[in-house]
Image (cartoon, coloured by chain):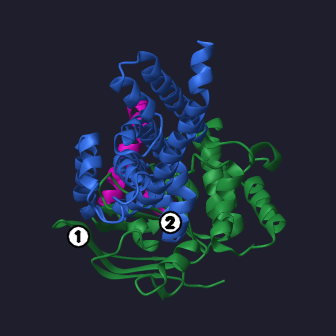
Chain colours: A blue, B green
Amino acid sequence: MTSFFDRYGSQIGRLTFEHVWLTGSAMLFAVAIAVPLGILLTRRERLARPVLAFANIVQTIPNLALFGLLLPVPFLGDRAARLAIVALIGYALLPILRNTYAGIRGIDPSLVDVANALGMTNWQRLLRVELPLAASFILAGIRTSTVTCVGVATIAAAIGAGGLGELIFRGVASVDNGLVLAGAVPAALLALCADGVLGLLEKRLVVRR
Amino acid sequence: MATHGVEFADVSFTVGGRPILRGVSLRVEAGTTTALLGRSGSGKTTLLRTVNALVRPTSGRVLVDGRDVATEDVIALRRGIGYVIQETGLFPHLTVGGNVLLPLEINRQFAGHLDEADHEVEKALESVGLPYAEFRGRYPWQLSGGQRQRAGVARALVNKPSVLLMDEPFGALDPLTRAEMQTMLRELLRRTQVTTLIVTHDLDEAIYLADRIVLLDDGRVAANLASSEVFDSREPSIRAYVAAARRGQQETAR
């Protein structure tokens, strides 16, 4: 056991860091796209169905296929990490988009009414009423996306983007279960950590009524 | 103080081919209180909501302090009109202090003078019988129904609006709490002289709080009289309403 860590310890460390970097940057972009888009959908109801349907379809493309499909795309295909992040963003969009949209739509209409009656501008209503009231929903979406992303990111190793998947693929290829676990266990722990931390934050944002 | 108050001139509202208001003309003198009475679906809430432009009339005009609501800047208009609704009016994510401060914050009239704004919040809360120090930090879920409505009234009056709109403000309260609220509100309305429209279907509440009673029936004004005249009125729609509200008394008097 000690020799195992002597051999792979520094690799596990480096690949875990890569994994966090891939997932983290994908999530940053996904949130930056999906939250404003979700808000926009509540303002342009006609767009809601087609946009949510599109995000749904992206979600259903098998991971490996999406990575493969994006490979020939110029600029994206040039760097494996870049490609992996774009694919991860694709998977992360839907839960955040859906929860932002549903969270704002689900606010008690009489509260929206009161916000309007107080003479709030659209921005004031969004920032002071709608976002605070929908915050725990939006965060729940971000949490789901993050956990999914940590898992999907292991596949990114297949196209050479690095991350903990590298150990898993090498372990599978060399029929070395120890190596598979060396990638899988830290990946699972990462997912659990993200889930736990975001879950705590989500709880704090719940508005009691 | 402006002498105009609120005026409805032949106001109609139709939604999906169904008429809700059919040519309502009505004048609410500045500084007085008018109760809009009528059965559910008679159009009283819709009429109330034309005043702060939450509802746009299909035809006719609504004037607030002599200015046509249709041509006013809607944000500025609404900031000058207090609005209280039944039960759910307070924002659950803000404290009582935060809720009452909100009308001042969004108006930026106290930008950079937060202590002055706080002072206004304190005055508003004390005027509805909620001690500032005790209640400012509480959330709506920590309040009783009556306290919640008091906070709602404080929020509606904190920026000294010229008009106050109340939509069944005490509808969800028990009779004792309701009576306390009515006592508080009557005193407050007398003191602030705000032009008030209050929707209710409680006859006693209407008579106790309002100077004038307007009975709506199927989108029309069925009766418009001083509240002191209600019990002597020969107007059939008023007599029917009084009879319905007094059934318990009549039953036991037999």
Residue B5, horizontal then vertical, whole percent: 54, 79
Q: Relative to B251, does residue A122 appear above or below in the rendering?
A: below
Q: Is residue B186 visible?
A: no
Q: Residue at x 57, y 50 (%)?
A: B90
Above or below: residue A127 compared with residue A132? below
**Residue kind at label 1, given as amino acid type:** Thr
Dot 2 lies on which element? helix
For residue A12: magenta?
A: no
Q: Residue at x 39, y 52 (%)?
A: A80
Q: Which mark is nearer the camera, 1 or 2?
A: 2
Q: Is residue A34 above or below residue A17?
A: below
State the extent of the magenta-drawn residues as a range. Answer: B228-254
Farthest-out residue, top:
A1
Q: CA distance from mark 1 to mark 2?
A: 21 Å
SS at mark 1 in the image: strand
Quarter of the image containing the C terminus of chain A? top right
Residue A150: horizontal and vertical position, in percent? 45, 37
Q: Nearer the viewer, residue B241 or B131?
A: B131
> Residue A174 in the image: x percent, y percent?
36, 23
Name the residue that disc number 1 marks: B14
* Residues marked 1 and 2 touching at CB (< 8 Å): no
Is B123 positioned to the left or the right of B176 in the image?
Answer: right
The residue singled out by tag 2 in the image is: A117
Q: Is residue B126 above or below residue B80?
A: above
Q: Chain of mark 1?
A: B
Q: Residues within 10 Å of mark 1 (few under 14, many from 20)?
A: some
Q: Quadrant of residue B63?
A: bottom left
Q: Let me know if residue B41 appears in the view.
A: yes
Q: Main secondary structure of the magenta part?
A: helix
| Chain letter behind tag 2 | A
Q: Quadrant of the N terminus of chain A?
A: top right
| Residue for point 40% across, 18% down | A176
